[in-house]
Structures are given as C-alpha cells and as structure tokens.
C-alpha cells in the first residue's frame, strides 16, 4: 500500500487517501483494481419519491453552510434527514459520494473501505482535485470513536470547497468542540428539520386533504412539525369521513403513529428503560431529582442524559441540560402504554409529582398533578391559598382551566375549590356566579375537617361585601369581619381594606376611605396587585373630590402602571382604573392616551352589566365625565343613564347623588359654552384655536401666524375662558364638541 501524503502535500498517486487510521490506495471505479461486488443501495443517493414535500427551508440552510467543512444533521427517526440530503444532492451541483452505514461498518477497516468506495464511485482524481460532498448516512450505526477517527481522517485531505455531511439519529458523534469554536461546523437539529405550516399544508394536499389554515396550524403545533407524525396524521385524517379536522384531534396514541413509535423507539429498549419512559411520561418536564422522587429510583439524571443522546425524542430545555421534556405526541403514546401495562401506577405517580412540585414552589404543576391524581380537595386547597397571586397576575384563565377539568358536583363539595371559583368569577365580572359558588362553599364548609376554616369564612364574607345586597354600610361591616378572621400576612386583607374604603367613600366618610385605600394599596402591591390598582384608582377619585388634580393624576398613573405590569387590562374589574386614567390624561393634555383609556373602559364596562351595582355605577359616572370632556356627549349621556339604572340596586349610597349632580352640571356648562362662549370667540382667537390640537408650542404657533408669543398667549387664555377650559386638551375637547374642530 503506498504512503499517504500528509495534509497540504500534493497527492502523488492516483488513489491514495487516508480514512482515520486506515491507509487505502484505490483507483477510479472503472479501473482494474476496483472489482468489489457492491451492494448498490449502500452507495447510491436515494431516489426522490413522487409526492414528497420539497424542504426548501432546510435546503436553504444547507446552501448557506457550503463554506463549513463538516455538517451534522442529528434528530431521531422520522425527521426526514435522508430525504433532505437526497433533495440537496439533486440541486447542489457538486459530485456527491454517498454511503449509508451498516453494522458491519463498526470495524475501522470496513468503515474506511466503505468511505473509500463511496469516494471512488465519483472518480478518485475528481474527488482529490475538485470540490465534492461526502454524505455519511445512518452515522449512528458506528461507535463515536471509530466514526470520529474516520471523519477527522477525511477532513485532513478534503479538498477546499468540499464537505463531509453526517446524518445520525443520535447526538454529535465526532469530537466537534474545536470545530465549533473555529466555525468549521454547522449543526442542524430537530428544530431545523421540523416542517413549517406551509410544508405541512403541502404534505396534506398530497394526501388529498384540504384543511383550513387554523386546522393545519393546530396540527403542526401538536406534532411540533415532526415529519413522520404529519405523514401519519395525513393517513389517519384521510381515512376519516367528512371534515376530518372537526373530529377528535390527531394524537400520539393514534394506532398508526403508536405502532411506529413502538417499533422505532421502544422495541430495542430493555424492560427497566422502557418502564422509566412510560412512568416518566406523567411529567411535562423532567430532571434527575424529580424523576428519582416520582419513579422511586436512583440515577435518573444520568439516565436522562444518556437517553437524550439516543434515538429518542427527548429534548433538553436548558443550556446545562438539567431539564428535559418528551415530545408531546410521544408522551401521549407513553401514557397510553402506562395505562395498559400498569394501570394502578398513574395515580401514585401523579401524587408524588404533585408533592415534589409543591415543595419546589411550582404551584401550577402541583395543582395539575393533584387533579390528575383525583385529589380535588388538595388541588382546591392549593388553589385557594394562592388565588390572590393568580388573580393579581392576570392568570384567571388558568384558574378557569383547572375548574373545567373537574365535575361541577365535586367542586361544589370542596369548600376551598368552590370558594376559589367564587372569586375567579368575581374577577370576571360575574357576580351571580360568584355568589352561587360562595353559597356552595358555605354549605360544604361545616363538613370540612382540615384547617383554614376562618380564612374561607372570610372569603365568603368578601363575596357578600362585594355584592353589597344589603347596602354600603353592611358592605363595610362584612369586610371588617373578614379582615379580623384573616391572618396578619394574608393577601386577602388588601381586598378587605379596599371594600372598607369603598364603603366609607360611598357613605361620605372620605377620611376613613383614604386611610383604608392607602393600607389596601400597601398590602396589595406585592401579593394582590389587582386590588392595589383598584385602591389607587379610588384614591384618585378622592383626590378629584378634594380638588387636587395633580395628586389624582399621580394615583391614576400608578394604578394604570400596575395594570400594565401585571397584564390586568383584560380584567373587567380594571374598568375603574381606565376611567380615572382617562380623566388624568385629559388633565395633563395627553388627549390620545385619554381617548385610548376611555375606549378600553367602555369595552370592559360592557362586560359588567350584571356585575356589582355600586362598582358599575361609580365606573360609569367617572367614564361619563371623561367622555364629556373628550367631546363624546352621546356616549357620556349613555353612561350616565346606565349608571342611574344600576345605582338604585345599592341602598344608602350618599355619594351617587353628589356625583350625578356634578356630572349634570358639567353637561350644563358644556351647553352654556356651546351657546355663549363659542359665539364670543374673535377671528384672531379662532386662528389660534386651530393650532391647539397640534404639538406646536406657543412660540411655533406665533411664527406661523406672524405675531408675537405674548399675543398667542393672550389669545389662548381668552379661548380657555370662553370655552370653560382649564387646559389645552380640555379646550380642544370643548371646541370639538361645539363643532369648531374635528379629529
């Protein structure tokens, strides 16, 4: 065998190459020294099958990687690695040497011979002197050290502009750390090989399916773009009668896909490993300590690391590879296997998982697992204890989702769960449902043997205080009783202070109201931001009553910021915050912001028709004031009429009459302005008025009118006086209402 030249030296013999530690001298496939009987399929680029989707996105990635000497495609079975490389070989333009590895290639000499044979099929001189691509498919069939030596040997003599491409079901096999650092390597994994929505739609059309866009998107989401799962989905859906997307969604336990999963992934596993897979499938996220606790075993961290490097759809979730997750459809199949093999284990696994997550502080998963274990009582306790946080963070949807998974009668028999639902519906603006669930909780409470009765009784009193069926005075009394029943650090105490403050405000005790609202805001800022925002909004209302517009605007800004920070803008009970924010925006000349806040308030108020009467009345009155100042007279009248209608449902409220009088006085002033003030505006004042809706300063207006800045100021002050306005924005709003301006 001739001596193989070192890297960079010219090749002195026709077919001398080095593959790993093997020295091979070969000639062109047509030469006399190459007379081996080959298995054609091993060295042939797979032919393209009709109907296959063109993977244009992945092909583009491969084209962009032409400058990298090594390309790694690594993903479990079914991700179309071979198909993608075959499509790439068709249009790349360079000669392609292809070898599909087999078990016999585990021997270094055999592997070197296979690679040399693949290269020889495109011509040795052509390979050694020109650019080409060497594709090594099914690279997982060979040990990492053997394959690594071979690949490094090929890279040592690879001509400039050539590439080695490895496709494997396992993780990166050669030692690639240095190549990553030197940017000699490009890696394509599961996310790169997943099908897009457009590709999935093409695949489904090829199967004769024309699904709606949303149905295709949902299928891509469920399959996570796994090509083989989409293929089986197309088969399964095509076999269904009319409108297949409207039936039960395609899932991982579909018999076609499940059979594939069993054959490709489970069949070769040992019983202990298979048991690890099925039992761990109850977890949506996996780590070593969690699996040790739930599966009652040791060494789970090492097991997960090993499995993630194998031909299994187990994905790391963090850079340190501490947390993992199963592919969603694969996990569905595993859970079905668990029910068949160990039907009694599922509940125990969920109980252990719930306890572990509760101790780790992950309450969402603790509740999920408690419900899966059938422990409604424990789930209800966790939900009730942490409900202020869920509501304060704008996560009422999650609360409603947990409820939807439990039969209504079971929730009704569980006092903490029923009470959680009462306050969840209250946050949605559904007072009748809130009272209904509170009554169910009150019925179930005497039978409760566990602790926490005082806190739950306080929760029932809070619902009664919000409803205020017996008037504002009783509302304050119920809130005070609830406050005394609660622990000192209970986040529910913020709600008590808000309701006590509101009762004081509605009955005319402004000093008490201010004190309660301040305490409620301080208590709720961390643990109940939804309540804190309402306390700040009420403090803004009080500041307006005290004729302190600057303080009112400050409270309104803080309330609005809290709503934004905690994603509470969809919460109907945030309507009052937007009403006072609209008023604050007008006072500060931020007309656009004021209009946006008023519009948001109108939307939320529309959901409050059957909500708490006093809240609906107060919010509508504040909204009517802002709407009138913005020139929306019809809208303001409508809000006042609705406020008058609902205000009668709450007795002994002395403030409503005062607020209604102030609102109608505002209407009267507006009418007087329209009749008298407008008519007295001079031509010079009207010219200045035209510029007030703009962002021009008085100096800039003066330049455009060719007058002095002092003249402009004089005219502006006259406009304010004649339009009964105290600010530029209010003058614009009043002039718009009078027909002098238009937006």
Image (cartoon, rainbow, N blue to C red):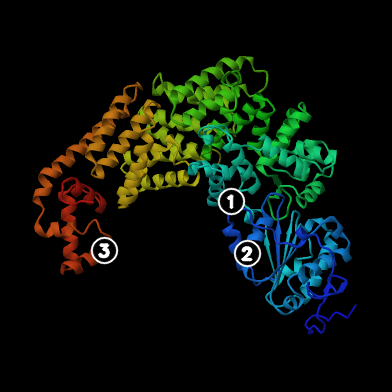
Front position among marks 1 and 3: 1
Tell me the CA gap for discs 2 and 1: 16 Å
CA neighbours of label 3 inside 10 A, class few (<14), some (14 to 19), many (20+) = few
Counting from the top left corner in percent of width and height, residue 295 is at 79, 36
User: Is 304 displayed left or right of 579 in the figure?
Assistant: right
As rendered, which of 200 and 597 lies closer to the eye?
200
Question: How far is the residue under mark 1 from the one under mark 3?
Answer: 67 Å
Q: Position of residue 554 (x, y in %)?
A: 39, 48
Alpha-carbon span between mark 2 and mark 3: 66 Å
N-terminal of the pair, mark 2 or mark 1, is: 1
Give the labeled residue for mark 1.
Answer: 51
The residue that appears at 36% across and 22% down in the rendered structure is: 650
Task: Say if residue 24 shows up in the picture.
Answer: yes
Image: 458 above or below 287? above
Task: Say what secondary structure mark 3 lies in.
Answer: loop
**610 relative to 733, above or below:** above
Q: How many marks?
A: 3
**Residue 697: which disc?**
3
Report the residue marked by disc 2. 90
The residue at the point 76 percent across, 54 percent down is 170
**284 up-or-down from 693: above or below:** above
Q: Position of residue 624 (x, y in %)?
A: 28, 37
Which residue is at the front of the view, 260 or 477? 260
Image disc number at residue 320: none
């Amino acid at each position: 065998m001739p001596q193989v030249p070192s890297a960079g030296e010219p090749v002195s013999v026709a077919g001398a190459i080095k593959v790993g530690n093997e020295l091979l001298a070969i000639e062109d496939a047509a030469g006399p020294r190459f007379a081996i009987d080959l298995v054609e399929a091993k060295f042939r680029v797979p032919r393209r099958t009709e109907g296959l989707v063109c993977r244009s996105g992945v092909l583009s990635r491969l084209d962009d990687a032409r400058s990298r000497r090594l390309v790694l495609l690594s993903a479990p079975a079914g991700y179309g690695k071979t198909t993608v490389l075959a499509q790439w070989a068709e249009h790349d333009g360079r000669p392609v040497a292809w070898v599909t590895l087999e078990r016999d290639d585990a021997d270094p000499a055999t592997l070197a011979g296979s690679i040399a044979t693949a290269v020889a099929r495109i011509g040795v001189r052509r390979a050694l002197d020109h650019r080409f691509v060497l594709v090594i498919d099914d690279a997982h069939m060979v040990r990492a050290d053997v394959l690594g030596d071979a690949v490094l040997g090929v890279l040592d003599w690879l001509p400039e502009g050539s590439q080695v491409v490895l496709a494997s079901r396992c993780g990166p096999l050669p030692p690639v750390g240095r190549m990553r650092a030197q940017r000699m390597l490009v890696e394509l994994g599961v996310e790169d090989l997943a099908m897009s929505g457009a590709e999935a739609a093409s695949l489904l059309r090829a199967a004769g399916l024309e699904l709606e866009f949303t149905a295709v998107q949902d299928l891509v989401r469920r399959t996570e773009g796994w090509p083989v799962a989409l293929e089986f989905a197309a088969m399964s859906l095509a076999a269904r009668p009319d409108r297949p997307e409207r039936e039960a969604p395609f899932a991982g336990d579909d018999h076609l896909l499940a059979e594939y999963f069993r054959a490709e992934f489970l069949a070769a596993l040992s019983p202990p490993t298979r048991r690890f897979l099925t039992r761990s499938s109850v977890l949506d996220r996996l780590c070593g300590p969690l699996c040790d606790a739930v599966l009652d075993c040791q060494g789970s961290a090492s097991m997960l690391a090993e499995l993630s490097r194998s031909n299994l759809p187990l994905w790391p979730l963090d850079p340190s590879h501490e947390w993992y997750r199963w592919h969603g459809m694969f996990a569905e199949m595993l859970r079905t296997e668990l029910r068949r093999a160990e039907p009694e284990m599922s509940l125990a696994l969920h109980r252990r998982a719930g306890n572990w997550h509760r101790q780790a502080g992950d309450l969402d998963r603790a509740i999920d697992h408690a419900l899966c274990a059938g422990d409604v009582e424990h789930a209800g306790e966790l939900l009730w204890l942490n409900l202020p946080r869920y509501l304060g963070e704008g996560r009422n949807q999650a609360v409603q989702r947990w409820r939807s998974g439990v039969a209504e009668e079971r929730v009704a028999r569980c006092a903490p769960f029923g009470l959680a639902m009462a306050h969840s519906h209250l946050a949605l603006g559904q007072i009748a449902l809130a009272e209904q669930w509170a009554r169910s909780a009150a019925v179930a409470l005497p039978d409760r043997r566990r602790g926490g009765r005082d806190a739950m009784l306080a929760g029932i009193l809070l619902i009664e205080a919000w409803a205020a069926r017996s008037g504002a005075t009783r509302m304050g009394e119920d809130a005070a009783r609830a406050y005394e029943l609660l622990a000192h650090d209970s986040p529910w105490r913020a709600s008590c202070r808000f309701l006590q403050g509101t009762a004081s405000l509605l009955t005319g005790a402004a000093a008490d109201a201010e004190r309660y609202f301040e305490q409620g805001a301080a208590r709720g800022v961390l643990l109940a931001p939804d309540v804190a925002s309402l306390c700040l909004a009420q403090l803004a209302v009080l500041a307006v009553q005290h004729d302190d517009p600057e303080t009112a605007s400050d409270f309104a800004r803080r309330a609005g910021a809290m709503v934004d920070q905690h994603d509470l803008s969809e919460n109907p009970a945030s309507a009052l915050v937007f009403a006072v924010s609209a008023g604050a925006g007008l006072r500060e000349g931020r007309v656009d912001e004021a209009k946006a806040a008023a519009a948001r308030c109108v939307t939320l108020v529309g959901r409050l028709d059957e909500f708490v009467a006093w809240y609906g009345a107060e919010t509508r009155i504040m909204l009517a004031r802002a709407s009138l100042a913005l020139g929306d007279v019809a809208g303001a009248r409508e809000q006042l009429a609705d406020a008058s209608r609902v205000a009668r449902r709450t007795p002994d409220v002395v403030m409503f009459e005062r607020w209604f009088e102030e609102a109608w006085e505002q209407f009267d002033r507006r009418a007087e302005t329209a009749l008298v003030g407008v008519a007295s505006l001079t031509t010079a004042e009207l010219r200045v008025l035209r510029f007030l809706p703009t962002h021009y300063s008085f100096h800039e207006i003066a330049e455009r009118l060719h007058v002095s800045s002092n003249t402009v100021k004089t005219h502006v002050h006259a406009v304010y006086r004649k339009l009964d306005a105290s600010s530029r924005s209010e003058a614009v709003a009043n002039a718009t209402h009078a027909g002098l301006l238009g937006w």
